[in-house]
């Protein structure tokens, strides 16, 4: 089986623009309606809504890799990171603190070009308290990075990422591709949607970390939308809406 990264055309992504235009139009319509609703909120309500949306995003991001936290733990960490002083509940769940910190960091840096430092910082925030994980470092082992399912001894290999030794070349290529991405013929919103989708696919294709690739990939998809639209955008709100 040839994986996408083994294709001689990689990372050239081919898709049918006319087929995605209706999806982009629907996204733009929903975004406009949500923005209109939020504009009518008081500043206090906007703050509370922002925290609730980030809570939903943090929980959904964690579920990608099978981690489930209580709403109270994550909300406590989010409000602490947001500087909301009227929230006094303490939280000792370090993993919940980490995902909350990551969500805040993604939104604080959405306007910056993606860089190796940003990816490594995100990974360090997420995995600093994980034993046996080199937090803030790309994988370097000789073992293949595989996505598998099934029981021990009866695995099904769904995907195998590029070997670690190729990452010093492939990661900079990805970063350049992302930062140079332009598709102005479908508008700013369309450009954001496509970069979010393809950037996510490209990142997960590389699977550059030992663990946490799914959570960081979702954060990257969210950054792409926010960056192109020049305002914080949360993927989870569209699922709720």
Image (cartoon, rainbow, N blue to C red):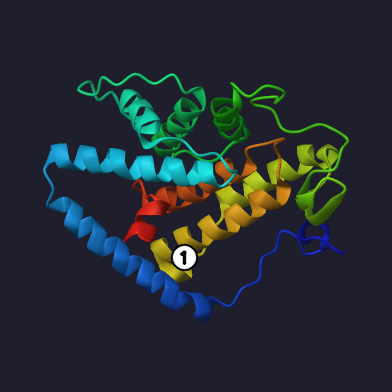
- Of residues 128 and 137, the one nearer the viewer is 128
Residue 196 is situated, as x and y percent measured from the top left of the image, at: 51, 56
Would you place residue 124 above or below residue 209 in this image? above
Residue matched to label 1: 184
Point out the residue furthest to the bottom here. 18
Q: Quadrant of residue 167?
A: top right
- Of residues 151 and 142, the one nearer the viewer is 151
Crowding near the residue tagged with mark 1, few <14, some 14–19, many ≥20 C-alpha atoms within 10 Å: few
Residue drawn at x 66%, y 50% is 204
Residue 64 is situated, as x and y percent measured from the top left of the image, at: 56, 47
Would you place residue 182 above or below residue 60 in this image? below
Residue drawn at x 56%, y 56% is 181
Residue drawn at x 59%, y 54% is 199
Q: Image quadrant for the C terminus?
A: bottom left
Q: Quadrant of residue 23?
A: bottom left
How many numbered dots are placed on residues in this image? 1
């Amino acid at each position: 089986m040839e994986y996408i990264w083994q294709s001689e055309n990689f990372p050239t992504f081919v898709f049918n623009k006319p087929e995605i235009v209706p999806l982009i139009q629907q996204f733009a319509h929903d975004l406009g309606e949500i923005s209109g609703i939020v504009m009518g909120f008081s500043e206090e309500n906007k703050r509370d809504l922002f925290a609730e949306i980030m809570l939903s995003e943090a929980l959904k991001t964690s579920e990608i890799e099978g981690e489930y936290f209580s709403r109270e733990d994550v909300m406590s960490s989010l409000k602490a990171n947001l500087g909301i002083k009227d929230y006094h509940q303490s939280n000792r769940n370090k993993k919940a603190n980490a995902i909350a910190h990551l969500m805040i960091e993604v939104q604080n840096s959405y306007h910056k070009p993606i860089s190796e430092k940003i990816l490594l910082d995100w990974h360090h925030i997420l995995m600093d308290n994980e034993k046996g994980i080199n937090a803030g470092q790309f994988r370097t082992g000789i073992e293949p990075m595989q996505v598998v399912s099934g029981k021990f001894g009866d695995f099904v290999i769904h995907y195998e990422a590029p070997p670690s030794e190729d990452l010093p070349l492939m990661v900079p290529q990805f970063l350049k591709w992302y930062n140079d991405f332009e598709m102005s013929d479908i508008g700013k919103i369309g450009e954001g949607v496509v970069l979010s989708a393809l950037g996510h696919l490209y990142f997960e294709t590389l699977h550059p970390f030992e663990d946490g690739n799914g959570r960081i990939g979702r954060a990257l998809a969210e950054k792409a939308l926010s960056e192109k639209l020049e305002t914080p955008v949360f993927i989870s709100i569209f699922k709720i809406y």
